[in-house]
Every structure is written in C-alpha cells, then in structure tokens.
Image (tube, rainbow, N blue to C red):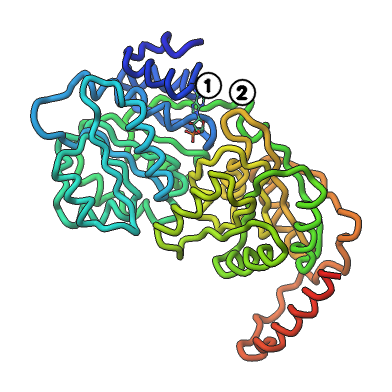
Amino acid sequence: MPFSSLKLCEPILHALEVSGFTKPTPIQEKVIPLVLEGHDVMARAQTGSGKSASFVLPVLQMWSTKITEGKGKIKALILTPTRELTLQVSAAFESFGAFLPRKPRVVSVIGGESIGDQLYAIQQGCDILVATSGRFLDVLSKKQANLSHLEFFILDEADKMLDLGFAEELDLILREIPAQRQNLLFSATYPPKMAAIAARITQNPVEVSLDGEAPTVQAITQRVIEVNRENRGPLLRHLLNTEQWGQLLVFMANKRASDNIAMKFRKYGFSADSFHGDLSQEDRNYTLDQFKAKKLRILFATDIAARGLDIEGIDCVINFDLPRSSADYIHRIGRTARAGKSGMAISFIAHEDQDHFRLIEKRSQIKLPREQIGGFELTGTPPPKTKGPEPVKGKGKSKKDKAREQAAKDATAKR
Ligand code: AMP
C-alpha cells in the first residue's frame, strides 16, 4: 500500500518522498486513517515501528486545513519521556511539514536548556509544542503558555513516563487543557497503571496493536551469555575482536560504571564514550552526533539512552548490566534493528542475575538459550538463596583495597 492511499495531502506526500519513506509501516497504515477520522487512539507500539510518523503526519494534515490568521496558537501538545525523543518528534514535524502552505511553528521544550528562551519561543507563536513531561510542568507553572486552543493531546512512549512519576502530575496538565480534544496514546506496554491513565485521558479510544504481525523485536537476535561479573569486560573485548560488529550500544547500571568502562576501553584502543543524564545537553548532543557520524564505535550508556533514541545502524546492544524491568529490556534491545534492519542483543548474566533474568523472560514471554564462551565460562556456584543480612556500612573493602584488586584484575586481563 502506498502512502497516497492514506488520504494524505500532496505537500505531505512530497515530504515523505523527500525523506525516502516509500510505504507506510503497519502501525502507520492502521493509525493514520483513524486519526484523520477524528478518533482517539490507544496504540500498543514499540519504538522502531514508525509510531512517531503515525501521529505526526495526520496531525500536520488536520492542523494545516484549519490554520487561522495571526500568531500560531498551540494546537498540538506532545509529551515524551526524554529530551532526545522530544527533539526527534519536533524534527519529524518540521521535515514532514516543510512543504505545507504554511510551515508549522514547532517548539521543543526540554530540560537542560534555558526555559526563558523556550517560553519566548512559545510566545512568539507556536503551533505544535513537543515537550518532556518534567519541563512541561515547569512551563505550566509559569503560566505563560496558552493551551486553551489545544486540539491534540499526544503521549509518546507513555509507559516510560510512568517511571518518571507522570501519573501524579497528570491532573495539573488536564486542568489546563480543553476537555474537548483528540487524544493519541502510544505505549510499548499497557501495565494496569498505564491502562488507568489511558482511561483518564482518552474517550472511546480505538485500540490498535500489531499482535499477530511480526513485532520489531523479532528482527533482533537475542542472546544470553553466562559469564562471571569480573569477566564481562574481557569477554566484551574478546567479542569485539571476534564478531563482525560495527557499532555497539552497551547498557550499564549507572553513570559511574559507564564513565569508568568507557575510559578503560579507550585505554585498550577502542573508540568509546559514555552517555548518561549527568552530561550537559551540549555534551549529550555532541556524543550522540559523534556516534551517529560513526566516529565512535562503542557507546556505554545508562537507561536514559534506552528511551526513544533513534540511531540507525547499531549492530548490537549489550546488556552489560541487566535492565531493571522487562519493559526496559524491550526498550533497550529496540535500539538495534531499526527501520527494518536486523540486529543483535546480548545479555551478560552471572549466577546472581539468573533469577532476575528469568523474570524478565517470563514477563516478555520469551525463553532464550544460555551460552558460554570458551575462555570465559561461568565458574563458581550460585550464591545461597536465603537473604543474608544487609552489608554493614564501613565493613566493606576500602577504596584502596578495591583499587588494588582492580589493578590486579586489569593486569590479568592484559596478559
Ligand atoms: P519510530 O518508531 O517512530 O521511532 O521510527 C523508527 C524509525 O523508522 C525512524 O528512523 C523513522 O524515521 C523510520 N521510519 C518510520 N516510518 C517509516 C517508513 N514508512 N518508511 C521508512 N522508514 C520509516
């Protein structure tokens, strides 16, 4: 089916052609007509499915047929969980709206950049506001954005916003926007909390899911390698030297681990960097641009990178540390195999991760075979199941002892 059979207008079809989009993805085929007909939509859609264009295109079309004279008024509000996704969605509105008789004025509202500039941009005339939920609340509290003309309220990757305490903040937002509006909800999962939010926001929504069709994750070969925790770094280096991978996204449990390992890998001669929420927006943009330009081979990242990052060409995602939830697992591995390409996702698991990973498998309804790699086999025995006393503060190893142990390990690894 070509895009032209979806009743999209000529300027949008032209923009699609310029972007190299030849035919709609399954989610776009289903969602675009529903939005154009004015329905509320509640879609179960993974990142990588083309969900952003499925709301960007029809919203642009409907907006452009009702443009009023004078300064732009906020007609569409799109909330996303991260700065990166916000910028991506804004960019999609701009590129697909580029040939409309009047180009939409799109403002991105994200943390890490001056709120004053963003408020000024809104006041200069804004048709489409794309925001991270946290920063949007700051904007609301300043009472400088007039939302009384809003026609579209859209939540993208809504389940990711739940983690950020969004459910509690929703009341403040709903108070500010007109009751009469079209609501579109996109989420990879619908846990009970999400369903409750959906019920508060939408009215008789049409539910769309692609169950029964090949979900994006099936294009991803998922592997699980059993390895002792202290051997994960050496194993990763071994795999980098033996597998034919180009770019890699490696998920770490926290910012420090991410910084440390990136530094180590640079010492071993890999082009690697670290990406997490403590970096300034400028540094984050710079690192991402370097990665997108393929000047970096390995990006060590915390979960912040799992949310909505749109980078094509990542060959492999590694869960060096396991994600906390099955939803995070799906989001993480969805960073590879973008836009119809295939990809690989590998999780490293030690004895102490077995139970947690089994739970992730159960919740994601998958069962993966365990592998071990010669020279890095899992040794030792699983720790006893009984919960021991919490480690006593001050009784652990001193920093010096840890540094000595690490130095000894590094020396062994180099041999
Ligand atoms: P999304 O799921 O919206 O994050 O989209 C994933 C990726 O697929 C993005 O890089 C989009 O630019 C790309 N994409 C979305 N729709 C299409 C399409 N119909 N044809 C080709 N690429 C697409």
> Left or right: where does residue 333 sit relative to residue 10?
right
Q: Quadrant of the C terminus?
A: bottom right
Callout 2–callout 1 Cβ contact below 8 Å: yes
Crowding around mark 1 (Cα neighbors within 10 Å: few <14, some 14 to 19, many 20+) is: some
**SS state under label 2:** loop
> Left or right: where does residue 275 sit relative to residue 13?
right
- View extreme (right): residue: 374
Please report the residue visible at 42 percent of the width from the left and 44 percent of the height from the top: 85
Please report the residue visible at 35 percent of the width from the left and 19 percent of the height from the top: 12
Q: Which residue is mark 1?
A: 26
Vertical side of 6 occupied by 363: above or below? below
Quadrant of the rendered image containing residue 349: bottom right
- View extreme (left): residue: 70
Quadrant of the rendered image containing residue 383: bottom right
Q: Position of residue 280 (x, y in %)?
A: 41, 62
Q: Closer to the N terminus: mark 2 or mark 1?
A: 1
For discs 2 and 1, the disc positioned in front in the rendered view? 1
Please report the residue visible at 57 percent of the width from the left and 57 percent of the height from the top: 301
Residue labelled 1 has its Cβ within 8 Å of some atom of ligand 1:
no
> Left or right: where does residue 188 sit relative to residue 101?
right
Q: Amino acid at mark 2?
A: Glu
Q: Can you tell which mark lies on residue 234?
A: none
Q: Amino acid at mark 1?
A: Pro
Residue sitting nearer the eye, 99 or 305: 99
Please report the residue visible at 88 percent of the width from the left and 69 percent of the height from the top: 380
Crowding around mark 2 (Cα neighbors within 10 Å: few <14, some 14 to 19, many 20+) is: few
Quadrant of the rendered image containing residue 9: top left
Q: Which residue is mark 2?
A: 213
> Left or right: where does residue 247 sit relative to residue 59?
right
Q: Position of residue 181 (x, y in %)?
A: 24, 31
